[in-house]
Amino acid sequence: MVRAALGQNDALQRLDYADFRANTCAQEAGAEADVLARQRNSVEDKGARYVNNVTSVTVQGDRASADVSYYFAGARDVKYDVPTTFVREDGTWRVCTPGPA
């Protein structure tokens, strides 16, 4: 799960939709143009987004949950704690909850 959260966030920072999609569940992947536009707007408003921590990981079969903490470059002291769902698709854990934008 940690790898999926970090991979998804890294892909967004690089505006790499293919990598974003590889770390995001099918139902949350969205359309490439929309995802990238939302990311560009977020960076413009708040700066780059970083994963601060992943805690409270619980796995139940092909579903899991964790608390993912994020912060933005524009306000490093403000943390956004997001209860996050993960699903295993095609043998790979993927993020299935939108992070803060």
Image (cartoon, grey):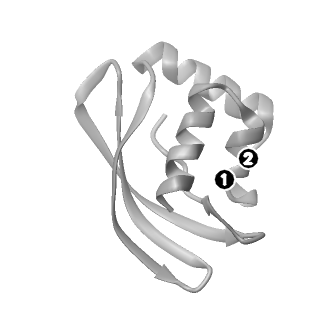
The answer to which of 28 and 14 lies nearer the viewer is 14
Residue that mark 2 sits on: 21
Q: Residue furthest top?
A: 44
Tell me which residue sits at (52%, 54%) in the image. Answer: 3
- Left or right of 32 on screen, residue 52: left
Whether residue 29 is visible, yes or no, is: no
Residue 53 against residue 51 in the figure, above or below: below
Which numbered disc covers residue 1?
none
Q: Amino acid at mark 1?
A: Thr
Residue that mark 1 sits on: 24
Whether residue 95 is visible, yes or no, is: yes
Where residue 20 appears, as percent x and y from the top left, is 68, 42
**Which secondary structure lies at badge 1?**
loop
Q: Amino acid at mark 2?
A: Arg
Where residue 44 appears, as percent x and y from the top left, is 50, 13
Task: Give the quadrant of residue 35.
Answer: top right
Q: CA distance from mark 1 to mark 2?
A: 5 Å
Answer yes or no: do the residues labelled 1 and 2 have beta carbons within 8 Å? yes
Residue 85 against residue 30 in the figure, above or below: below
Residue 31 against residue 75 in the figure, above or below: below
Tell me which residue sits at (35%, 21%) in the image. Answer: 73
Tell me which residue sits at (69%, 59%) in the image. Answer: 25
Tell me which residue sits at (62%, 70%) in the image. Answer: 87
Where residue 82 appears, as percent x and y from the top left, is 38, 53
**Which secondary structure lies at badge 2?**
helix
